[in-house]
Amino acid sequence: MKYIEKLRNSGLRPTKQRLQICEVLFDREKTFHFTINELEQKIKNHTSRKISLATVYNTVHAFEKKGYLKQIPINSSETYFDTNVTDHHHFYDLKEEKLIDLENSDVGPINILKRINGKKIKSVEVLVKLED
Amino acid sequence: MKYIEKLRNSGLRPTKQRLQICEVLFDREKTFHFTINELEQKIKNHTSRKISLATVYNTVHAFEKKGYLKQIPINSSETYFDTNVTDHHHFYDLKEEKLIDLENSDVGPINILKRINGKKIKSVEVLVKLED
DNA sequence: ACACTTTTTTAGAATCATTATAAACTGGAA
DNA sequence: TTCCAGTTTATAATGATTCTAAAAAAGTGT
């Protein structure tokens, strides 16, 4: 299994649950944007034995901490995560409540001119809201 | 009272509670970023008679709908609002959990090259996360 | 001021995403 | 195999937000 190494290397035990979640999350061509509930559904379809909701939360947070996932800043009742952890941006379709990737090349270069004393810039994220 | 007109003009009855919340929100020099709980504290200090939490929620949502407030997209357990409804951006200090305004002039012009069929761009918001 | 309608406020209950708990289980080292 | 730290699990707890429905206040016409 290709994910066993990945998990071991980051100090996470390659448990059955984590490996199955890896498959759902990372065996894809395209970026995957999801909420915990959407992920749970995908896991249900993918796997015979169910994985506890608490484990899904634990795992997603563990993966986020290790840098395999990132949260997308957005105002929604549920938290959105992204399997694409590179620097990139998003459209958010307000009606459909769906996220769409914006490559860096789709957004002109962003140059933050202001700086705050003693603070480093960790990330720059652009959210483009769409309406009909 | 200067807010009576403002409320009437937007079809909101100028009640005692709304006027007091207006004072807390809008009688300031600078932009005010707040969560509902922070706002409740400010109201407590400003007013003798307490305003019900439900009313604070109702009022903030009514003001948002009328365009006097906007939500700031950010991953936090609480929703952040902003009295500055012009197009502008934010630093978010992850350690302090504080928002800092970024004027448009602090951020180079942002040009979204991609378009989605049948959708209009409603807003473009940049969130710059800060760490130590 | 009074009567009447509509909007607003309110306290408390309900909801829902997320986190905490603590007992059972598992992976991996010795 | 034995042991232990790390994981999983069901369930309870938490906390922000929304709902409810009754009381209060605002606006309107008389």
Image (tube, coloured by chain):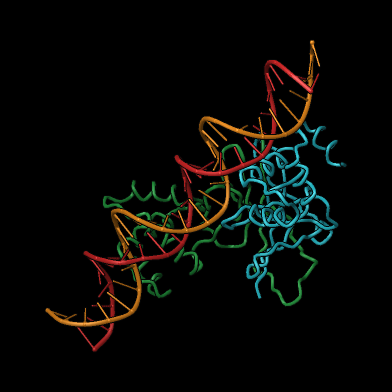
Chain colours: A green, B cyan, C red, D orange
Q: Where is residue B114 in the image (x, y as percent from the top left)?
A: 68, 46
Count of all numbered marks drawn on residues in the image: 0
Point 67% across, 37% down: residue: A131
* Residue A106 appearing in the image: no
Residue A121 location, quadrant: bottom right
> Which one is nearer the viewer's eye here, B113 or B8?
B8
> Which one is nearer the viewer's eye here, B51 or A16?
B51
Q: Position of residue A24 (x, y in %)?
A: 39, 54
* Residue A114 appearing in the image: yes
Residue B71 shown left or right of residue A113 in the figure: left
Residue B76 shown left or right of residue A110 in the figure: left
Point 65% across, 72% down: residue: B131
Residue A44 shown left or right of residue B22 in the figure: left
Q: Where is residue A67 in the image (x, y as percent from the top left)?
A: 51, 67
Point 81% across, 62% down: residue: B106
> Which one is nearer the viewer's eye here, B109 or B92?
B92
Q: Quadrant of the C terminus of chain A?
A: top right
Looking at the image, residue A93 lies above or below residue D8: above
Residue B33 location, quadrant: bottom right
Residue found farthest to the right: B2
Q: Position of residue A40 (x, y in %)?
A: 39, 50
Looking at the image, residue B35 lies above or below residue A123: above
Residue A71 shown left or right of residue B11 in the figure: left
Q: Quadrant of the N terminus of chain A?
A: bottom left
Looking at the image, residue B66 lies above or below residue A46: above
